[in-house]
Structures are given as C-alpha cells and as structure tokens.
C-alpha cells in the first residue's frame, strides 16, 4: 500500500526540514538539546476513503540508552503497524532501528518492511576513516536477493532515522517563508536528494483533544520534470522538542493524515502548546 509506505517516509523525513545542508562536514558532531533516553511518541494514522476517515494504523517511536560495538549509543526504534481493518486488505509491519552516538553521529541503520506478501530490508553501517564518511549499504529484496554497495563522501551522510533525531537540535529561526531546503537521505541502495519548502508558522488545533499548538509548517515536494508536486505538509512544534504533531499526505485518490496522540518523557517543556 503506497499510502502507508509514504506516510512512514513522511514521518521519518518531517524533521529533516530543520537541518541546514551547507558545511555539514564541519558539523558532524552536534550537541543534543531535544530529547533524552526514555522518550516515547505515539501517532495515529488515518486514511480518507470515499469521504470517510478510517484508522489506518499506528506509529511508535522510542529512544533508549544502549551500547553499540562497545561504545555508548542511543537506540531509536520506530515501528509502524496497520490497523485490523486495513490488515484485511493489506498487511503492514515496518520497523526502523538506528544507533547514534550521544553527539548524534550515526553508527547503524536498519529498516525491515513487511508489506502485503513482500518483505525487504535496508541496512547501513557507518565508519569514519581519515576524516571521510563511509557507508556500507545492503538491500535484501522480496526475492531473497542481497545487494551490497559502498558510498564514501567528505560530507556527513545520514539515513531517515539518524537525521530525524539530529535535526531536532537545529535552530530554524533563520528560515524565511518560501525557502527551499535540500537534504540527502541514504537507504540500503542509494543516497538521494530531497526537497522541502518552509511555509511559515501556523496555529493548529488537534481534532481529537482540542490541544492548540504553535507550529512550523513545511511541505515535502517531488519534481516531475520541472513541475513541482506537493506530497506532504508537516506541522512541527515550535519549541525545543521539535516534534511532528500532524502530517497531511496528498494523494491522487484521497488524503492521509498522522496525528500525535501521546508524548511521554520529553526533555523540554512543551511551550508550543497554546491551549488545552
């Protein structure tokens, strides 16, 4: 189901809007100001089908303190699960795991995607020899075939999860409305450039709880030739937590949404909340 897969991608790329793409190499280590081990974020996913909103599934992001190859690390675990109703049409279980250093430098990434009757795995191992960034990338396709790739760059390189966590500590105060932001995202096969547009600040009221947030709004766009196509609109809390609280996904045949429904063990006060 492309809708669910794109929602997962949207969730993982939402906070990439907060990162600068120039001079990344000199900024690889970064002080974490946004989260601590123990943070837990839960999302409800919805899909609009023939003017009816149905619950399409849930997403859960947890952060814990771990060791990776003997060094201190943070383990970031995101799992997206389809609802019982959507399971009748399409089974979906996606799991993403990322190990990052306390200074937010990536060490390892894995995405296992069980969608319908298909199962595939993306993996990335990071190393930093002689001041370079080297990625060992591996892709297991649904037919059981394995493809290995090596990518080396003088710049810092990230996957969806490690950049999501890193971007939460950036300061977006210098952005201007309409600014285009480009970033690079690695998976088990390639490194791809993506584009977001900053739309400014907006107040948003959560439909189920009535909680009102002050948010930073971004659009994730794709290009078909020179034509720009808006894929997702993100609402990100305008505070030091920088949490995505709402995502709107625009499709040819409908709309999908993701809403934050629970946030536990946050590092910073939720100053973006205007009213409850």
Image (cartoon, grey):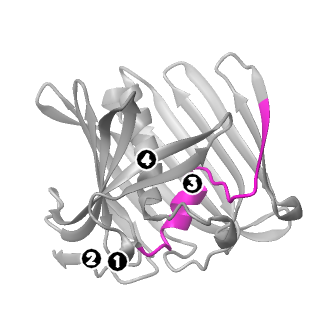
List the residue tagged with mark 3: 161
| Viewport quadrant of the C terminus | bottom left
Q: Earlier in the sequence, mark 3 or mark 1?
A: 3
Q: Earlier in the sequence, mark 2 or mark 4?
A: 4
| Tag nearer the camera, 4 or 3 | 4
Q: Earlier in the sequence, mark 1 or mark 2?
A: 1
**Is residue 211 visible from the viewing direction of this image?**
yes
Q: Quadrant of residue 5?
A: top left
How would you rate the neighbour count of disc 3 (Cα within 10 Å): few for under 14, some for 14-19, many for 20 or more? many
| Viewport quadrant of the N terminus | top left
List the residue tagged with mark 4: 195
Secondary structure state at the residue bearing disc 2: loop
**Is residue 82 visible from the viewing direction of this image?**
no
Which range of residues does the magenta coloring cover?
A: 148-171
Residues at discs 1 and 2 in contact (Cβ within 8 Å): yes
Q: Which label was assigned to residue 239?
A: 1
């Amino acid at each position: 189901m492309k809708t669910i897969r794109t929602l997962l991608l949207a969730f993982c790329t939402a906070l990439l809007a907060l990162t600068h793409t120039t001079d990344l190499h000199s900024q690889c280590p970064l002080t974490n100001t946004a989260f601590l081990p123990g943070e837990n974020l839960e999302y409800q996913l919805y899909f609009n089908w023939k003017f009816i909103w149905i619950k399409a599934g849930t997403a859960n992001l947890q952060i814990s303190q771990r060791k990776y190859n003997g060094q201190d690390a943070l383990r970031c675990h995101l799992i997206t699960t389809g609802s019982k109703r959507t399971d009748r049409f399409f089974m979906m279980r996606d799991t993403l795991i990322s190990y990052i250093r306390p200074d937010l430098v990536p060490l390892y990434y894995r995405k296992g995607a069980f969608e319908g009757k298909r199962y595939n795995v993306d993996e990335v191992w990071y190393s930093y020899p002689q001041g370079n960034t080297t990625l060992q990338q591996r892709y297991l396709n649904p037919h059981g075939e394995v493809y290995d790739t090596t990518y080396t760059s003088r710049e810092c390189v990230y996957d969806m999860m490690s950049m999501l966590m890193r971007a939460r500590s950036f300061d977006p105060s210098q952005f201007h409305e309409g600014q285009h932001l480009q970033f690079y995202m690695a998976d088990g096969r390639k490194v791809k450039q993506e584009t977001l547009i900053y739309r400014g600040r907006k107040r948003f009221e959560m439909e189920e709880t009535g909680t009102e947030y002050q948010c930073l709004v971004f659009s994730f766009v794709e290009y078909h030739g020179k034509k720009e196509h808006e894929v997702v609109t993100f609402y990100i809390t305008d505070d030091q937590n920088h949490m995505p609280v709402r995502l709107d996904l625009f499709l040819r045949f409908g709309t999908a949404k993701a809403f934050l429904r629970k946030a536990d063990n946050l590092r910073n006060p939720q100053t973006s909340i205007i009213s409850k």
